[in-house]
Structure formats: structure tokens, C-alpha cells
Amino acid sequence: MKNLLLLLLAGVLSGCASTWNSPPLETVDSVDLERYMGEWYVIANIPYFGERGNVAGRAIYRMREDGRMDDIYLYRDGDFDAPEERLEGVAWVVDEDSNARWKVRFYWPLTFAYYIVDLDPDYQWSLVGHPSRNYAWIMARAPRIDDELYEQLLARFEELGFDSSDLKKVPQFPDQIGQPGFQ
């Protein structure tokens, strides 16, 4: 829990830091929230202390009656034999014109910006970023994507002003641990 509190504090502080050297982070024009809901595997991220070393990471988004969304993060701490951990948060849309800018909170009162910066037309993959460009995720409906698509998604992050070399793959299968390009 201490690591998560530090993560959220880092997110708040990075959100407070001005990104005056970078243009505003663009998002997709429109997100159909009903289609976006469901399970997403964390294919890659910019490692930070809250997720560094996690394996089998995935997020589940569910609409709530109050209009907000459940944000459930499931993972194993460093090893596929470790018990599955679960964090339950809440998310809400802050740009209702596009539904592509959210706030996420796992511990009150700390919130974190969640921007959907690219999205497969069939909702099979998503690129999520933070306006500071210090945090980024490649999410997919399946636990594995092909290498060609992965390289295209890294290039897209570069176009958006992220340093794609900072992204590392998250092991979704035991044989991926220790492989090049993985955390």
C-alpha cells in the first residue's frame, strides 16, 4: 500500500509540474465507453515503482450506476507463482466531448490523469498516456500482440512526444520473464 500511495503522490506531483516544453497531449476524438469497458492486458508500460516488476498485469473497467467507472487492477508481484493482487479504484470522464480524458483514483484524495491517446477501431488495443509523458501504457484485449503491431504502437508514442525507449513489456506468460525488452 505504501508503494501505491507513493505512486499516486508521484502522479499528482507530475501532474502539477508544467509541461511547458511539450505541446498539450492530444487524445483520440471519441471513445465509446461501453465498448471500452472490460478487460485490458498491460502489454507494456513506462516502469515506475507502482508497477515495476509486476507480471500478468491487467485492468478491468466497468460502468457504475453513478456514471463513474470501476478501475480494477490485477497483477502478481514479480512471479507467476505469487498470489494475484487486486487494487480497486474509480475513474470518471473529465472530457465528455470525447470520453478520452479521465481521472483515476485508487486512494482518496489522490487522482491521476488517464488519457486515451490512440485506440484501435475495433477496440483491440489502446494507448494510454499521462500529460507529463512520464507514464504510458500499451493495453490490449489479448495477453499478447504481434511484434509488428508493437513496433507501430511504439512509433505512435514517439509521434505523441513520448520516449518510446522507456516502455518495457510486461510479462504475461512465465517464459517472458528475463527476455529482452521485458521488465
Image (cartoon, rainbow, N blue to C red):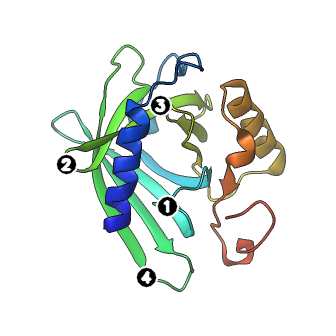
Badge number at residue 115: 3
Q: Secondary structure at mark 2?
A: loop
Q: Dot 1, crowdedness within 10 Å: few (<14), some or many (≥20)? A: few
Q: Which residue is mark 2?
A: 108
- For marks 4 and 1, the one nearer the N-term is 1
> Between 167 and 72, which is closer to the camera in this rendering?
167
Residue 2 in the image, given as x and y percentages of width and height: 32, 67
Mark 1 against mark 2, which lies toward the viewer? Answer: 1
Q: Is residue 62 left or right of residue 21?
A: left
Q: Secondary structure at mark 1?
A: loop
Kind of residue sitting beneath label 3: Tyr
Disc 2 and disc 4 in contact, CB within 8 angstroms: no
> Between 134 and 72, which is closer to the camera in this rendering?
134
Kind of residue sitting beneath label 2: Trp
User: Would residue 37 be seen by someone viewing this image from the given angle?
Assistant: no
Q: CA distance from mark 1 to mark 3?
A: 20 Å
Residue 173 in the image, given as x and y percentages of width and height: 66, 72
- For marks 1 and 2, the one nearer the N-term is 1
- For marks 2 and 4, the one nearer the N-term is 4
